[in-house]
Amino acid sequence: MQTQPHSRLRRLSLGALLLMLAGVSHAIDPTPPLADAALQARYEAITHELRCMQCQNQSIADSQVGLAADLRREVRTLLVEGKSDADIRDHMVARYGDFILFRPRMNARTAWLWLAPFVLLAIGAVVAVRVLRKRAQLVDADAQVIDRFDGTDDT
Amino acid sequence: MIPELGHFALILALLLSGLQAVFGIAGASLARERWMATVQPAVAGQFVMLAAAMGTLIAAFVTHDFSVKYVAENSNTALPLFYRIAALWGAHEGSLLLWIFILSVWTVAVALASGGLPRPFVARVLGVLGFVSFGFLLFTLATSNPFARLVPAAPDGRDLNPLLQDFALALHPPLLYTGYVGFAIAFAFACAAMLEGRVDQSWARWARPWTASAWAFLTIGISLGSWWAYYELGWGGFWFWDPVENASFMPWLVGAALLHSLAVTDKRGLFKSWTLLLAILAFSLSLLGTFLVRSGVLVSVHSFAADPARGIFILGFLITVIGGALALYAWRAPALGSQAGFELGARESFLLFNNILLVIAAAVVFGGTMAPLVSDALGLGTLSVGPPYFEPTFLLPMLPLLALLAVGIHANWKRGRLGASRRRWLGAGVLALVLAIAVSFGFYGSPGWLTLTGFALGIWILLSSLVEPINRLRRGLMLPRAVLGMTVAHAGLAVFVIGVTAVQSYSQERDVGLKPGEAVTLDRYEFRFGGVQPVEGPNYDGVRGQVTVTRDGHALVELTPEKRRYWVQRQVMTEASIDAGVRRDLFAALGEDLGANTWSIRVQVRPLIRFVWLGAYLMALGGFLAATDRRYRTARARVAEDTRAGAPTQTEVAASQA
Amino acid sequence: MNRFLLPLGLFALLVVLLAVGLRRAPEKGVIESPLIGKPAPQFTLPDLFDGTRRVQSGDFAGRWHLFNVWGTWCAECRAEHETLLAIQKGGVVPVVGLNWKDDDAQALAWLAQLGNPYAAVAADRDGRVAVDWGVYGAPESFLIAPDGRVVRKQVGALTREIWERDFLPLVTRAAPGG
């Protein structure tokens, strides 16, 4: 698949890099800020949450490829037309699918992802309580004597 | 001819690693002294062979041997010497060789330092390491031979990816791999203990220094990558929650949990099965990272060229190594128990919280990283998971973890009501909150609640971690390396938290189109664009912009962001120009020529961003300090003595040392 | 069952997941279009051959047609061109081109040199229509049914094999001889 002129972002086969971060070069969005500061803030927030489809792991705010610029323009147009953030996301999803959202939408298909951290915390809490109960019962029978200042403990 | 010698050395290394695995594991379980005696020479021989292979490949790079395919693809006659050497790990095949070589170095270190340990145990440890090495060597030789020839030889090479032509990034992979691979040692100790069937706390004590140093290396590796991303990718962030970054972050989190869990197992004989599991997990996540990066299952621009054949091989290897270890665990762990007890508020309880929360944090990162894969595999559609998911969900376990750390530092082992140390932790907490408010309003202004929380937690941990060492010093007591290391690492975490808070809360950036002479103002800084001039490097040309920064009318610094065009790969790179400072970084990057003498320019002011990496380096330093504590060496010698005498069990020994 | 088997069980699940992921890895980078089964986006654009005339989405309503996104800057489009010419020659469906963010003169020269497979070419100079179609890399091809719905999408060069396997049967099955 070929991408835009002057912005061919090939799939990098960069060895060794576990921490190779997004993209070849950075984007500088030279469009003048929107007159309304609140609108500009929303613009910046939304463009950071939309994935640049060509470069796959950059937001359209951070990508300099042509398509990212087109999508930024689309966002600006929709903002100026008075569309809400949700409208704009829907607009993009209707064209590019859920893949374009860096923040997965909460729905039946993604609920597990958003609930997982809370479920994990709940499991963690149950485990902690059980271990603590068990160990608290054993503490009087435990003969090991520990001196904090003998230089061998801690850490 | 020389490259073939390198290939041959790899084959010999494969054979030796096979010997090491078989004789180490079988020799120990059949109690064959002579089998076990071959293990150490096999380790040494394998090291020599791998060093020869590395040397051969480096020689091919240095001498521009473009008849070697890997060299032709990753080097060029115009490439400076330093990067020609670094190009060795610039792509899949060479980086795999580096991975194996580093494993060999770790193995040699274990072999050398294990003089005092029981012989069958050492044989098993080296056997397990040999098995891991065997798998990776087989993988290299079967699918990814770095010595493959190119016929006919290329007249010149395709050059190293310009992104990699950078000092920090040249050092990043070796350090990162040293960390990753270092977890193999704890893994091997755990497996050896399980194979032996005597899973008491002695293995935990032996594994501690190795784990601490591996974790410290990983910390440096990750932070180098982050630092590089900050100045090289050119938009001023330091962490993007990319799958490839996450692949290195998960073992780091689990490794941190392991460090703390090992302490409890070593000290109190508690959490034995849990510690085993963490040792397995930390290394498994390292292996999983290797799989994710090299198989193409996840979408990332950073991954190696996708090759399902390689993916299948690694998957098979994962099943053998991780599946085997976990099966061993399911077999041995049920027999482990401890009668030790502790109260809520004792040090053990805080380390329990630490472990639970760190593992949850790792699980959250894991879930988010794997979510696109899960969703796709279950037919729930394609989706993306990026920073807007990771940032809030990661804080969920992290904020309580930080708060509990600030309190838990003051706790005693076994018994310890919070009341006893209340004066310390509460005092530090109140002071931290006051300082946090003062700092936010004094320097930056109008903090959100998250900003205040971040500052307060960071300062609280910093103050808390210093109380104990200061007390000890005032009483004229020694500060053992392990305690010093812990203090430095915790202080590093505090510095990191403060840095991240400031950067996330108070960074400012602006993208503008400027003509020469025009300026943009950010915070109190004025960035004036002075135009561009042509520049030429050894293998690129480009333009250099000039941006003069003044504050309140005083000239501060001249920034010279560049835009380079690398000749061979025809890639345009942005070199941001940064004025680093303790209090803030000033950042300018050059974008496109917009025509009519106008250039797009990105300017940023990032407060305390240096704290992010400073904190990471302090954490690493803490790890190294703890690893070099004398206690680990003397303990080892003592255990060896006792084992020879055949008298007490190791549990008793460890207990008596306490 | 002992709880120490739990990690092994979870790992087994992970292995299954990775295996499925691996099997699907070659398809990665191709993102399923949400347009499939939905009405094709409407557009009105200048005709590449005559800037005073318009090409509209309604022009081919009621007929099967292939909507192809291309540009002269796109190397794979050149590779695909052969297939498009063959499709045109086959006469089963007309091909409608969307010339994406291109230079008119270059695009005309390209067609003059390589042959013109298109029944009509709309010039999307600023890329707005491409965004409506969810285009993220040329070439992309959409098969449009007579009722105006998008039936199939190909990202990347269309080959004769892909055309005959994935596209043509949809048309012939729906309208024998069509």
Image (cartoon, coloured by chain):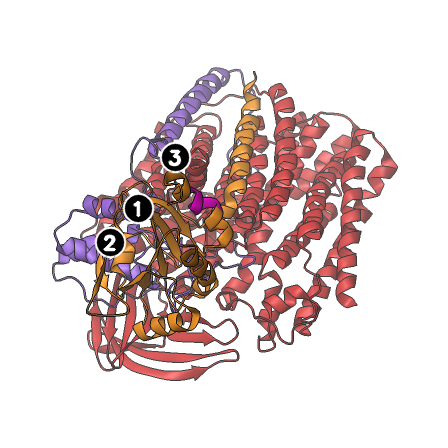
Q: Is residue B499 magenta?
A: no
Q: What chain letter is assigned to the residue under label 2?
A: C
Q: Nearer the viewer, residue A2 or B23?
A: A2
Distance CA(mark 3)–CA(mark 2) = 31 Å
Labels 1 & 3 near each other (Cβ < 8 A): no
Please tell me the colour of chain C: orange
Amino acid found under the numbered disc labelled 2: Ser
The kind of residue tagged 3 is: Leu
Whether residue B452 appears in this view of the structure is no
Amino acid, disc 1: Gly
Q: Nearer the viewer, mark 1 or mark 2?
A: 2
**Marks 1 and 2 close (CB-CB < 8 Å):** no
Q: CA distance from mark 1 to mark 2?
A: 55 Å
Residue at image mark 3: B380
Labels 1 and 2 positioned on one and the same chain = no
Look at the image and give the residue range highlighted in magenta.
C165-169
Q: Residue at x 65, y 76 (%)?
A: B155
Chain letter for the part of the structure drawn in red: B
Task: Identify the colour of chain A in the image.
Answer: purple
Image mark 1: chain: B
Is there any visible trace of residue C125 in the rendered image?
Answer: yes
User: What residue is shown with label 2?
Assistant: C57
In this view, the mark in front (1 or 3): 3
Q: Nearer the viewer, residue A64 or B280?
A: A64
Q: Mark 3: few, some, or many residues within 10 Å (few <14, many ≥20)?
A: some
For mark 3, give the secondary structure. loop
Q: Which residue is mark 1?
A: B454
State the image coordinates of residue B258 (x, y, percent, origin top left). Answer: 53, 37
- Taking B68 as reference, is B208 above or below it? above
